[in-house]
Image (cartoon, helix red, strand yellow):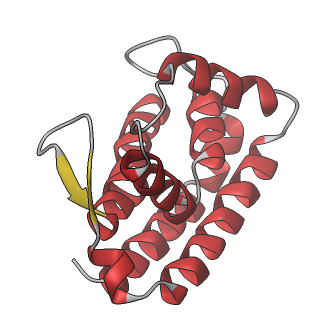
Amino acid sequence: MTPDEIIRLIEETDARLESIRERLVDGGERSLATGEWRVRDALSHLAARANPVARSIWRMESALAPGGAPAFDIHEENAGQLRDRSGQSIADLLTEIRDGHRAAIDELLALDEETLARRFPVAFPPHELSVLEFIDRAGPQHDNGHLDEVEAALA
């Protein structure tokens, strides 16, 4: 995986969102097949995490700091993301996602190879990733997994 490949994947995610924009606006209140989220909730979550570069750097720095990464409750974090965006329209959420992706691309291009290759422990297999690998997981892989669920709900 290279920065250029991740940029291409981010841009493909934006194109995917744009291609279903009208369906997203019309179907924002539809429930996803599993869990308690609606389409709007998934988009709120994607908007909150639209910049995987910033999150990846923070995770790496936290994991490598004395004492390791602080514990956090992912469910409470996700609930806060939804609360924070409860008054936003679907169009606003899509704009936030696109703007976060643009910021991620700019930040990714500014990172040096040493930072991108730096490895740090993570809580899920393979238990250690490079910053670049984490950006891919926290960005395009994460986004497209949720978009698969969203598209299934809109079908």
Residue 20 coordinates in the image, percent (x, y): 55, 54
- Towards the viewer: 53 or 154: 53
The residue at 71%/67% (across/down) is 99
The image quarter in which residue 94 lies? bottom right
Q: Is residue 12 left or right of residue 141?
A: right
Return the x and y of residue 92 as percentages of the image width and height.
Answer: 81, 50
Comparing 102 with 73, the one in front is: 73
Which picture quadrant has residue 85?
top right
Residue 83 left/right relative to 147: right
Quadrant containing the N terminus is: bottom left
Q: Residue furthest right?
A: 87
Outermost residue, left side: 126
Q: Would you place residue 111 above or below residue 39 in this image?
A: below
Q: Residue at x 32, y 54 (%)?
A: 137
Name of the residue lying farthest toward the front: 66
Residue 141 seen = yes
In the image shown, does 98 or 100 lie closer to the viewer? 100
Residue 66's x, y, as percent? 42, 44
Above or below 135: residue 65: above
Q: Quadrant of the C terminus?
A: top left
Reply above or below: 141 against 126: below
